[in-house]
Image (cartoon, rainbow, N blue to C red):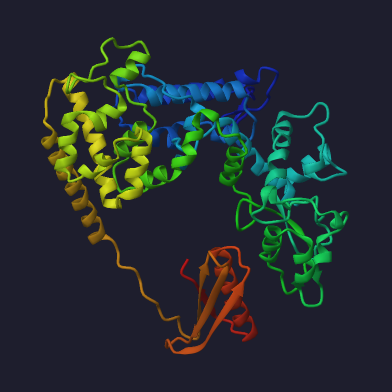
Amino acid sequence: MRCSTNIEKYLGLPSVIGKRRKASFQILKDRVTQRISHWSSRYLSQGGKEVFIKSVLQAIPTYAMTCFLLSESLCGELENIFARYWWQHDKGRRGIHWRQWQFMCRSKEEGGMGFRNMAKFNISLLAKQGWRIMNNTESLVEKFMKAKYFPDEQFLNSRLGNSSSYTWKSIWATKDVLRKGLIWRVGIGNNISVNCDAWIPNGVNFRLSSEVESMHDQFVSTLIDDNERIWKEDLIEDTFAEEDAVRIFQIPLAGVPHGDYLAWGGEASGVFLVRSAYKLLQTTDEFPRAYALQISYRNLYKKLWLLNLPTKIKITVWKITWNFLPTRVNLQHKKLAIDPICPRCGEQAETIDHLFRGCPIIKETWSTLLLQDVLLFENENFEEWLIWVFEQCNPQAWRLFCCALWALWGDRNLRIHEKKVSIGSEIGNFVIRYIAELDGLERKKLMQAEVKQKWRHPPRETIKINFDGAFDVHNRISASGIVIRNPEGAILFSCPEIHKGVPSAFATEALACRKAVRMGVENRWSEVIIEGDS
């Protein structure tokens, strides 16, 4: 065994963390900066930068963040490095930061780029350790932590104490996140307070919409018929608000009574996942007032990011929706340009609206693409025009429209920087050829794709049980069914079933699976394959 007198680091992390905590993790910043410098000589499109930041740069501090709570200042400095790299031009030239990084960390559906907020991601990773301490009571870490820091109480009720290690301080800081995301799964119901505890799925904070005075100091067990293991419908309908009653009826009760237990409400499985904890932290923030307009066209972004187009085109369109392009008017506002006149027509100021709607050359492009109808909505502002196009046109037209926006912006830059001049019809024909090339590549992929496998016979002396479910989201009614076959494929038994008050399609599939398992147990088959389609 090799001996070392240097015990400062173990597996790349500091073994001892003193008062200078920020300095202890300075190496994380150095690694990120070093990785960027290795790639600075290589040109990456904005789509390539997105992948590089998410998959490489933001992954560098992940291991450290699973063990320690990094300071907010360090997280901010890391995000500043990411922001500079995202907005900079090729060859490392400094670019314009059109929005703060907090906005860029919003999900794509909410108008951001889906980058990680490092401080919140740090808390989410550490919350995983808190979850393990709560549930893995036989682990060595749990036994050690409990004996030292909370010997007579549960983790959620523990106190920080004096002279605590930095590891314990880091894990202890995640208690609030766990409290917000935990929900009681109803078994007998005698441990769950009706008014005070989180036990209502799909409710605000998993609680009742309003407290019920008659249920003060009452437990959920009072709402359950112990003999038949069903909810007391009359009592619930007379006591609770209609929306709460509907949610209560959607909670399934096991046929065999079991104890109540805490589960993670962000996942249908009830098991903690870092991604759902991060999403919880993101949604609990107030939406910045400056970006409140985004709510009105969330569907636009959802459709945009689902389009079958290269990422560089979708990011360009995303920039257009937020007016993040260096048009001459925008540059003038930044005091980086003097002349705001459009370089194409030389008549009007080059605003984002003029660039894609008002310029005469642009109108020729839309006519070439047979999209002249998009100009019928000229009286509204630019944002409403984009919304209108995505609401009124079909998906094929969306692709053509977005590709045209990207091509128009590229042509404008070629005109300014390389003095290449194209007329509107030439730009339109380029877009048509580009889309045709993309479609040709897609057809090749489809031809190479494997054909979906059909149903297979089970092995000899084995029974196969197939299950499936269908869910009516409007009426909250679902149906499930099972089919049992022998090794020859002959149907031995089939059974449909209707369910009411089921909360989701996933729950419907789960009920069908449970029915299939019960059939196998009741018939005492030793060799059984249970198969679903989801």
- Residue 263's place in the image compared with 402, above or below, is below
Horizontally, residue 149 falls left or right of residue 175, namely right
Residue 25's spot in the image, x, y percent? 58, 23
In the image, taking residue 386 as reference, residue 259 lies left or right, namely: right
Pick whichever, 139 or 332, lies toward us.
Answer: 332
Give the image location of residue 264, x and y in percent.
Answer: 66, 52
Residue depicted at 62% across the width and 72% down the height: 500
Judge by depth and name the residue closer to the eye, 61 or 270: 270
Name the image quarter holding residue 357: top left
Q: Furthest-front residue in view?
A: 379
Whether 332 is drawn above or below 214: the answer is above
Total residue callouts: 0
Percent coordinates x, y for residue 475 in the rendering: 56, 68
User: Which of the pair 274/471 is nearer the observer?
Assistant: 471
Residue drawn where x is 84% and y is 65% of the image: 222
Q: Residue at 82% of width from left, 41% of height from top?
A: 157
Q: Against 465, is 164 above or below? A: above
Name the image quarter holding the N terminus: top right
Residue 31 drawn above or below residue 199: above
Report whether 276 appears left or right of 263.
left
Residue 13 visible in the shown view:
yes
In front of the other: 14 or 439: 439
Please identify the quarter of the rendering in which residue 288 is found.
top right
Asked if residue 232 shows in the view, the reply is no
Residue 36 spot, x, y in % from top left? 40, 24
